[in-house]
Amino acid sequence: MRKWRMIGGAVVAAAAVAVFAFVRFGNGGSPDMKADHFYNPVVENGADPWVIQQDGFYYYTHTVGNAIQIWKSRSLSEISSGETATVWTPPDGSPNSFDIWAPEIHWINGKWYIYYAADNGQNETHRMFVLESVTDDALGEYKDLGQITDPSNKWAIDGTVLQKPDGSLYFIWSGWEGDTNVSQHLYIAPMSSPSKISGDRVEISRPEHDWELIGQPTINEGPQVLMSDKKINIIYSASGSWTDDYTLGMLSADPDANVLDAASWKKHPLPVFAKTDDVFGPGHCSFVKSPDGKEDWIVYHAAKTSGSGWDRNVRMQPFKWNDDGTPDFGSPLSTKTAVPLPSGEDGRKRLEAENAVYGGMKVSDMAEASGGKAVGGWTGGDSYVEFQIEAEKKGLYVLALRYLNEGAVEQNLRVTINGKLKIDAKLDNGFNGQWSNEFIPVALQEGSNTIRFTGGDEWLSLDAVDVLPPQNMEKDR
């Protein structure tokens, strides 16, 4: 098992700015540098996000394709800066070695269980599998319990668990009716334990409305359970995941209903979370409370821009409830929109680019920037960006850099830390004015630290830098 503090793939980033500022953590710090909001995305590259809250921590995972990786964080909005570990990789020759999709981690009856889909290299062999924790550490060791299946043993992905208040368990997933890739339907079956299905599958949804029929094959997938005291809701993804029209639909049943009776489930006639003028393909979500338990949040993936297909990132926003016990998600928020931090999270230390010292750069008014201004105008090889952070303790900090790359190609930047460590990094392009964030883990020494950025071109602008300190991972804070 590999375990480290921050995934290396997040090291990149974007700063089209030269920042010179001092940030002090602990009891210090300048009040005017504290921000009470963040901007999406919260994970720059990722799909099929799953978050669960347990014992004061958030545990997060998403599809990485060839393994299962878990993140652990005190903060919901700072998932990218949490501790992370690869908890399972398939052994050589395993029948479930390829295309590992949509893992979910659940705490059931005092153990962690991870459900995931995988195949042997051919899509038609995709099935669901389950891991069980050896200890109570979600980032610790797991044993592979093998396939979890109903008697039909048909193609299956995106498995999740419904646990009713009486403790009864049900497995819900997306599968094929037959043996060919014509359409994905949603199925439910009873479970005798967290790793065993104990009865036949029952179809509860298939694509039928116009908004579910975009793309071939037609798709219902990514079912997620969202319960209230009035309804059991299943929020699912519909239409092709590679299209701008990927969207969320909803099934609802009464709390005392027989969930194994298809007639118990009512499909809502319209999508409950759909694309907007500048958010495309919102889908495959999960749900979690804010740190203080006062707010409900949806965590989902979306296409980075129109037409980007499976090039996606992860976003989050709060939602409300309707009087009938169904959720009201509203509309997906633009990457230009400031989102209040989840209730119970501390404010962020933020460096506004327009307050920086820079060479060969310029400040421009920009309404969607956090301070109303952004810095850009790289002038070639002589352009550089430099800022200092006065850290009260040694540790791995994360720089959350909000940028806009309006060019048609990725940007290449070099990040130099304290004049020694050099990292070559890439920034996504930003068609259609899509702002983005990069999360750069930076090992800081106690005291003064200097970070320099070189490279970039005229299309790159920086809004701000949020400095995220090391998180306390002890159970008792």
Image (cartoon, rainbow, N blue to C red):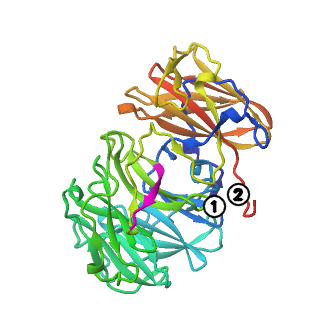
Give coordinates of residue 250: x percent, y percent. Answer: 33, 65
**At x 46% / y 49%, what residue is drawn?**
314
Q: Is residue 240 left or right of residue 137?
A: left
Q: Are marks 1 and 2 in contact (CB under 8 Å)?
A: yes
Q: Nearer the viewer, mark 1 or mark 2?
A: 1
Mark 2, Cα crowd under 10 Å, few <14 / some 14-19 / many 20+, is some
Label drawn at residue 473: 2
Q: In whole angstroms, how far apart are the C-alphas of marks 1 and 2?
A: 8 Å
Magenta highlight: main SS:
strand
- How many numbered marks have been drawn onto this rendered protein structure? 2
User: Looking at numbered disc 1 in the image, what kind of residue is underneath it?
Assistant: Phe
From the image, tell me which residue sits under label 1: 57
Residue 48 lies in quadrant: bottom left
Q: Is residue 31 left or right of residue 321?
A: right
Give the answer, above or below, for where 308 lies relative to 290.
above
Label drawn at residue 45: none
Residue 147 lies in quadrant: bottom left
- The stretch in magenta equals 315-323
Give coordinates of residue 470: x percent, y percent. Answer: 70, 47
Q: Is residue 459 left or right of residue 200?
A: right
Q: Earlier in the sequence, mark 1 or mark 2?
A: 1
Residue reaching furthest to the front = 323
Quick one: quadrant of the C terminus?
bottom right
User: Looking at numbered disc 2 in the image, what kind of residue is underneath it?
Assistant: Met
Secondary structure category for the residue under label 2:
loop
**At x 63% / y 23%, what residue is drawn?**
355
Can residue 152 be seen?
A: yes
